[in-house]
C-alpha cells in the first residue's frame, strides 16, 4: 500500500516503524519540521513534504497524525486531493462527523485510537468506521493497524473516548507504575538497573500469565497474596491509600478530556 502520514511525530513514527517491517509499503510524510522529516527519511526511506502536496492524490490511505488542535486546519486543506483514499484519523477527541464536515462532507473516514507499543508491533487499536467507508477501505484500515498489533472494531464512536483512556493513554500508566516500582527498589537498597530489570520482568511475566490463564485477574492476585504475608501488607497499603479508586478516577478523567477536546475543537 501507499500510505501518507500528515504529521510525522511520535505516533506516526511508531506506526511507520511497525509497518516498515511488514511488507513493502511506500510512505509519504507531511510535516513542517525538517528534523522530523530527515529522521524518518533516513530511518525508513519515506518521501517527505513540508506541506500538503499533490502526492496525496496517489496514495491508498491518508493517516491524520497531527495534534487534535491542528486537525481542523489540516482537514480543510485535504479536500482538493481526495478521490477514493481512506482517511484514517488517530487524533484523540476529534469526531468523525466534524472531520467529515471540515473535508467538505468526505465520508471515507475511519477513526482509530492506537498506542505507542505499535513501535514494536505490540500495539492495540480501537477503531470505528463512518457509514461511507467501503468494505475494501475498512479492510485497508484494519490491515494498517493489524500490522502493528491487535485491532478492536467498535460499533459506537462514543466508545473511542473510553478506549483512549484504557489503551491509548494506557502505556503511560504502565510506565508510571514501573517508575514507582523502580523508585521503591532503589529506596530499599537495590540499584536502579536491578530495580528496572525486576520491575519489567515482573510486569511482563504477570501480564503473560494473565493473558494465558482462564482465571480472573482477582483470583490471580489472590494466589500471590498469602495470608498475613508480604503481598497482603502491600495491597492493604494500596487499598488504604485509595490507589484503585484513584486509577479509576484518572482513567475517567482521560475519557472526559477526550470528550471535552471533541466539544471544544468540533464546535463551529
Ligand atoms: N502519542 C500517543 O501515544 C498517541 C497519540 N495519538 C494521537 O496522535 C496524534 C499525534 O500525536 P503525537 O504523535 O503524540 O504528536 P506529535 O506532536 O509527536 O506529532 C504531531 C506532528 O505533527 C506536526 N504538525 C504540526 N502541524 C502540522 C501540519 N499542519 N501538517 C503536518 N504536520 C503538522 C508536528 O510538528 P510540530 O511539532 O513542529 O508542531 C509534529 O511533528 C494526536 O492527535 C494524538 O491524539 C493517538 C494515540 C496515541
Ligand atoms: O495524550 C494524548 O492526548 C494522546 C492520546 C492517547 C495517547 N496520547
Image: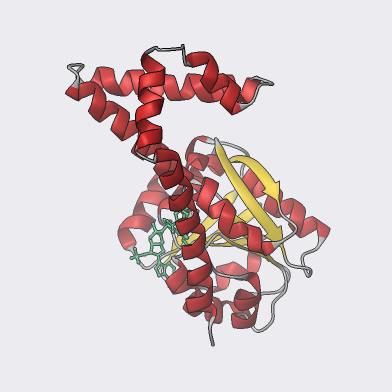
Query: Residue 103, percent across and down?
Result: 62, 80
Query: Residue 14, percent across and down?
Result: 47, 46
**Image quarter in which the C terminus is found:** bottom right
Query: Residue 7, percent across and down?
Result: 45, 62
Q: Which residue is more in the foreground, 159 or 100?
A: 159
Residue at image coords 35%, 54%: 38
**Residue farthest bottom in this picture:** 268
Residue at image coords 52%, 63%: 91
Q: Which residue is more in the foreground, 93 or 15?
A: 93
Q: Which residue is more in the foreground, 253 or 28?
A: 253
Residue 3 in view, yes or no? no
Residue at image coords 71%, 74%: 83
**Residue farthest right in this picture:** 135
Query: Where, by quadrant of the figure, is residue 173 drawn?
Result: top left
Q: Is residue 141 shown left or right of residue 239?
A: right
Q: Is residue 13 above or below residue 97?
A: above
Q: Is residue 183 shown left or right of residue 221?
A: left
Q: How many marks?
A: 0
Ligand 2 found in image quarter: bottom left
Amino acid at each position: 500500500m501507499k500510505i501518507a502520514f500528515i504529521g510525522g511525530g511520535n505516533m506516526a513514527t511508531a506506526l511507520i516503524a511497525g509497518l516498515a517491517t511488514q511488507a513493502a509499503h511506500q510512505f509519504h510524510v507531511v510535516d513542517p519540521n525538517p528534523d522530523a522529516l530527515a529522521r524518518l527519511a533516513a530511518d525508513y526511506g519515506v518521501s517527505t513534504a513540508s506541506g500538503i502536496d499533490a502526492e496525496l492524490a496517489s496514495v491508498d490511505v491518508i493517516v491524520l497524525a497531527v495534534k487534535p488542535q491542528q486537525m481542523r486546519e489540516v482537514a480543510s486543506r485535504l479536500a482538493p486531493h481526495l478521490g477514493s483514499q481512506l482517511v484514517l484519523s488517530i487524533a484523540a477527541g476529534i469526531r468523525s462527523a466534524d472531520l467529515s464536515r471540515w473535508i467538505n462532507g468526505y465520508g471515507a473516514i475511519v477513526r482509530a485510537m492506537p498506542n505507542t507499543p505499535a513501535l514494536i508491533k505490540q500495539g492495540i487499536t480501537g477503531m470505528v468506521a463512518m457509514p461511507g467507508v467501503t468494505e475494501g477501505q475498512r479492510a485497508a484500515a484494519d490491515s494498517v493497524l493489524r500490522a502493528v498489533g491487535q485491532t478492536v472494531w467498535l460499533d459506537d464512536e462514543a466508545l473511542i473516548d473510553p478506549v483512549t483512556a484504557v489503551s491509548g493513554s494506557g502505556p503511560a500508566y504502565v510506565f508510571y507504575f514501573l517508575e514507582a516500582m523502580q523508585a521503591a527498589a532503589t529506596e530499599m537498597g537495590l540499584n536502579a538497573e536491578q530495580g528496572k530489570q525486576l520491575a519489567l520482568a515482573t510486569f511482563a511475566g504477570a501480564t503473560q500469565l494473565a493473558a494465558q490463564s482462564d482465571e480472573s485477574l482477582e483470583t490471580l492476585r489472590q494466589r500471590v497474596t498469602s495470608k498475613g504475608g508480604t503481598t497482603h501488607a502491600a495491597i492493604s497499603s494500596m487499598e488504604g491509600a485509595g490507589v484503585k479508586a484513584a486509577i479509576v478516577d484518572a482513567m475517567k478523567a482521560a475519557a472526559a478530556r477526550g470528550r471535552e477536546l471533541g466539544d471544544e475543537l468540533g464546535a463551529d
